[in-house]
Amino acid sequence: MSLKLRMELLLLDNLIWVIVAIFFLFNLLFTENFASYDNLINIVFHSSILGLLVLAEGLILIIGHLDLSIDATLAFAPGLAMLLAMRWIHGGIDPVTTILITLAIGALVGLFNGYLIAKVGVNPFLQTLSMEIMLRGLVLFLVPLSIFPLSRIYTYAGAGRIVGNIPAAIIVMLAAYAIFHLIIQYTTYGRNYLATGGNPKASFIAGIDTRRMVISAFVIAGILAAVAGLLTAGRQGSVSNTMGTGMVMYAFAGAILGGCSLNGGKGTPLGMLGGTILLGMISNSLTLLGVDVTLVSATQGALIFLAIILDRGRERARNHLLHQEQVKKLALEPGQQAQQAG
C-alpha cells in the first residue's frame, strides 16, 4: 500500500476532526464568546453524558450490531439502585456500594441483551427495542416521582469540580475514551473485537469466540450507559423517570459521524469523541446565536440524516481508493513479470 493511499485512508478515518476544526474556526469568527475558556469547558461538560452513550453505541456498531436500549438503561440502572439503597433495604446501602450496584445493573441489562442476540439469535433491533420499551415502562412505574436527596459521593461524578473549575464529569468521559482507545488499538481483545465486527464468519473459523465478543460488547455498553446515568443523576441532584429520554438517536448520530460503520468492523473511540464534540459544539453555537430551541432540535435531527449520508460516502470513497490501488498493481504486474523473464 502506497504512502499516498495510507494518508488518504487516514484522512477518511479521521474526517470528523477536520469537520470539528472547520466548525470551530467558523464559530471563532462569527459566534461571540464561543472560544472563551468557560464556554469550551461548558461544551465538553454538557457533552459528557452523551459522550458515554456515543461510546457505548459506537462499540456496539463496531461489533456489527446496534443497541436502542442504552438511554433507558441510563435511567433504569440508577433508578433501581437508589430504590434499593434508600427504600427497599432496611438500613440502606452506603453510596460506594450503590455506585457498584448501578454499574452491575447496567452490566446485567447488557448481558441479557447480548445473550439473547448472540446465543439465541434474536434480531438485535427487535431485542434492544423491546428492552428499551420495557425498561422505560419499569422506570415510570418504579420512579413516578424523582428520588432525592442523593449522597454527595453518589453525585460527585456528575456535579463535582476539580482544579481549574473543570467538572469531574469531563474527566470521567475522557478516561472512558482513553481506556477503550488503548483496548481497541493495542490489545488482542481489541483486534479480535474489530475482526468480529468486520467478518464474524472468518473470525469464528480463525478461532475467535465471536458469541462471547458480542456478549461482552453489550455488557460494556450497559456499563457505560449506567455511568452516564450516574453523571445525569449527579448533575440534576436526583433520579427521575425522564433521564436520557430520546438520547439514543443522538448517540447513534455521534458514533456514525465519528467513523463507525453501519456494516461493522470500523470505528475508533477517538473518532467517536470527535462526533460527540461536534454535536456539543453545534448545540452550543446555535444557543449562543439565539436560535429557537425547536430549531436546535431540528438541526440535531438533521445530523442523524447527515451521519448516514456521511457513512455511505466514506464507505464508497474507501472502496474507490482501494479499487484504484488494486488496478495499479494489476497494471504493473505484466511489466514486472517481463522484467523477471528477461
Image (cartoon, rainbow, N blue to C red):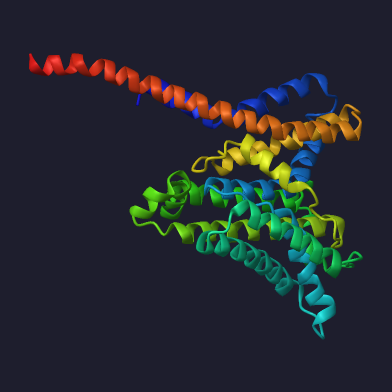
Give residue 258's quadrant in the image: top right
Q: Is residue 157 visible?
A: no
Q: Which residue is drawn at 60% across and 48% down?
A: 177
Q: In this picture, is 320 found above or below 141?
A: above
Q: In which quarter of the image is the N terminus?
A: top left
- Where is residue 232? Give x, y as percent: 79, 55
In the orientation shown, which residue stands out farthest toward the bottom? 90
Closest to the observer, 41 or 299? 299
148 versus 64 height, above or below? below
Q: Where is residue 145 in the image (x, y as percent from the top left)?
A: 92, 65
Q: Which residue is drawn at 62% across and 37% down?
A: 256
In the figure, is residue 206 to the left or right of 38?
left
- The residue at the point 61 percent across, 61 percent down is 113
Q: Give the farthest residue toward the left.
A: 342
Q: Position of residue 191 (x, y in %)?
A: 43, 49
For residue 332, above or below residue 129: above
Residue 203 in sight: yes
* 158 vs 222, nearest the viewer: 222
Q: Picture quarter containing residue 240? A: bottom right
| 100 relative position to 40: left or right | left
Q: Residue 257's x, y, as percent?
A: 64, 34
